Amino acid sequence: MSDTIREKIISATFPSRSYMYDLGPVTRGGNGEKVDQFVKAVSGHNYSTRDIATLSRAFFRGDEMVCDLISTGNVDWTLRMLKNQFVTQGCVQTEQEKFEKNLHSCLMIF
């Protein structure tokens, strides 16, 4: 555990449970720097452990665009997009597909 993560957990801006269950396995895979980046971005927002799990899945298993959005501070918006329930032609999409579809529709507005 890095000093940054230790500080965030001790100061109660990031839940230790989320680190143990959601980020611990990722850290063991050699992604320490990326985990630090995620913890810095998500800390202090008072997210539930379920929200942090959703964000971490998208951050570590999603594409680079999602990582960039979370890293640059668009965490609230990204979480809202990931939680939206889109149903397309009778099949429920994965979180990543929902996010990409919503992002595409938002970009079409601009």
Image: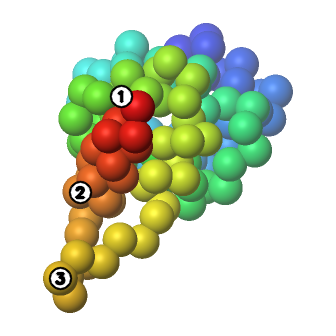
Residue 35 visible in rendering: no
Residue at x 47%, y 21% (from the top left corner): 71
The Cα–Cα distance between marks 1 and 3, rounded to whole angstroms, is 28 Å
Residue for badge 2? 97
Tell me which amino acid carries mark 3: Gln
Residue at x 23%, y 57% (from the top left corner): 97
Q: Is residue 107 above or below residue 35?
A: below
Question: Looking at this rendering, what residue extends furthest in the bottom direction?
Answer: 90
The Cα–Cα distance between marks 3 and 2, rounded to whole angstroms, is 14 Å
Asked whether, in this view, residue 38 is left or right of residue 34, the answer is right
- On the image, the x and y values in percent for residue 34 come to 37, 20
Question: For mark 3, does the 10 Å Cα neighbourhood hold few (<14), some (14 to 19), or many (20 or more) residues?
Answer: few
Question: Which mark is first along the chain, 1 or 2?
Answer: 1
Question: Looking at this rendering, what residue extends furthest in the front direction?
Answer: 109
Taking depth in this image into account, of 4 and 28 the one nearest to the observer is 4
Residue for badge 1? 67
Q: Quadrant of the C terminus?
A: top left
Q: The residue tagged with tag 2: helix, strand or loop?
A: helix
Taking depth in this image into account, of 51 and 65 the one nearest to the observer is 65
Give the mark toward the camera: 2 or 1.
2
Question: Which mark is first along the chain, 2 or 3?
Answer: 3
Residue at x 40%, y 40% (from the top left corner): 109
Marks 3,2: beta carbons within 8 A: no
Residue for badge 3? 89
- On the image, the x and y values in percent for residue 62 come to 25, 41
Question: For mark 1, does the 10 Å Cα neighbourhood hold few (<14), some (14 to 19), or many (20 or more) residues?
Answer: many
The Cα–Cα distance between marks 2 and 1, rounded to whole angstroms, is 15 Å
Tell me which amino acid carries mark 1: Cys
Question: Which mark is first along the chain, 3 or 1?
Answer: 1
